[in-house]
Amino acid sequence: MDKDTYSPDAVSTDDMVRRLREDLIDSYDEELELEFEDLDSTAGMRLPDGTLDDGLAARRNHRRAYFRELVRLQGELIKLQDWVVTTRQKVVILFEGRDAAGKGGAIKRITQRLNPRVCRVAALPAPNDRERTQWYFQRYVSHLPAGGEMVLFDRSWYNRAGVERVMGFCNDDEYEEFFRSVPEFERMLVRSGIHVMKYWFSITDDEQHSRFLSRIHDPLKQWKLSPMDLESRRRWEEYTKAKEVMLTRTHIPEAPWWVVQADDKKRARLNCIAHLLAQFPYEEVAHLPITLPPRERHPDYFRQPVPDSLIVPEVY
């Protein structure tokens, strides 16, 4: 679970620089993951005197091991996807956690190689005026899967137990009604044949602090920070209390909570995917061999030239 005591003085400058550096490397790794096959096989880097940087070599070996295991797990996810389609399974996976806990990164790795028509992400914005007058779960119901589909909720109906409670967006009666309703709502989903899985990504106080700093100083990540995120940082302890109540009151046998230790992003992703795969009795689905048909050619066919005005300039 989260560690709720933190002192900025406890984190040295060197440690903070290390964390920011590792976070930047992780961003680069996102771009490398789809081109894993092109990574060179050099484990370390030669220094000017010809020696090998052992620290760099260890980090490279760690990253390469991560890439290999991620690709292997993604191969299993494709088998799971095929099984879901063939057997017409309905799967819902909720991803919850503090801001910057790594939910989005885990979701990206799960969906990275899957068919978006089978596995889709639901990331709902704040409810509008009309939605606020609806039954609380109504706007989520429309995103539930049909047979042969998987839906990953990047935050979910548990907003009411977290951000809405802490920020005062719901009153006490609405909050209590949520806890009365959500177990029955999820039991109904399970009875209807939907697999419901709930993951909480847990990070420590100082880890969130360093990830927020990384977002502040990285122009490519600043969009991830909102005034709500900054306020959630100030209210760390209130979020901790809300999370503890939520896990206690909504952990049911039909749809239990699973806590992912997420201070190490790469380990968290691998652990989450491996656990997800272990929850299903999927089997590899046999596919007929694929044969590429010959291209038909007709002597009267003439390909029209594309006007230069339509061509994208080759800047690169």
Image (cartoon, rainbow, N blue to C red):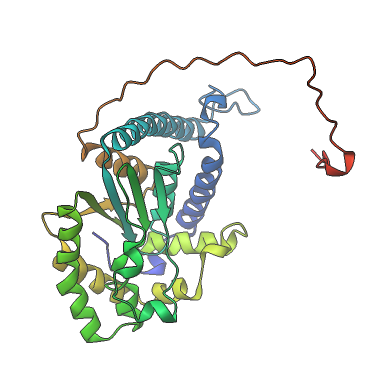
Residue 172 point in image, percent of width and height:
23, 85
Vertical order, 119 against 230 (above or below): above
Residue 164 point in image, percent of width and height:
33, 77
Q: Quadrant of residue 220?
A: bottom right
Q: Quadrant of the C terminus?
A: top right
**In the image, what residue occupies the spot 31% across and 63% down?**
141
Q: Nearer the viewer, residue 28 or 142?
A: 142
Q: Nearer the viewer, residue 205 or 194?
A: 194
Vertical order, 231 against 25 (above or below): below
**Residue 202 in view:** no
Q: Nearer the viewer, residue 107 or 37?
A: 107
Count of numbered marks: 0
Q: In the image as oriented, which residue stretches furthest toward the front?
A: 300
Residue 290 point in image, percent of width and height:
46, 17
**In the image, what residue occupies the spot 55% across and 36% down?**
32
Q: Quadrant of residue 298?
A: top right
Vertical order, 94 against 274 (above or below): below
Name the side, left or right, on which 184 lies relative to 282: left
Q: Quadrant of the N terminus?
A: bottom left
**Residue 91 in view:** yes
Name the side, left or right, on which 12 lies relative to 50: left
Vertical order, 71 against 15 (above or below): above
Q: In the image as oriented, which residue stretches furthest toward the left?
A: 253
Name the side, left or right, on which 232 lies relative to 160: right
Q: Nearer the viewer, residue 203 or 286?
A: 286
Residue 173 point in image, percent of width and height:
21, 85
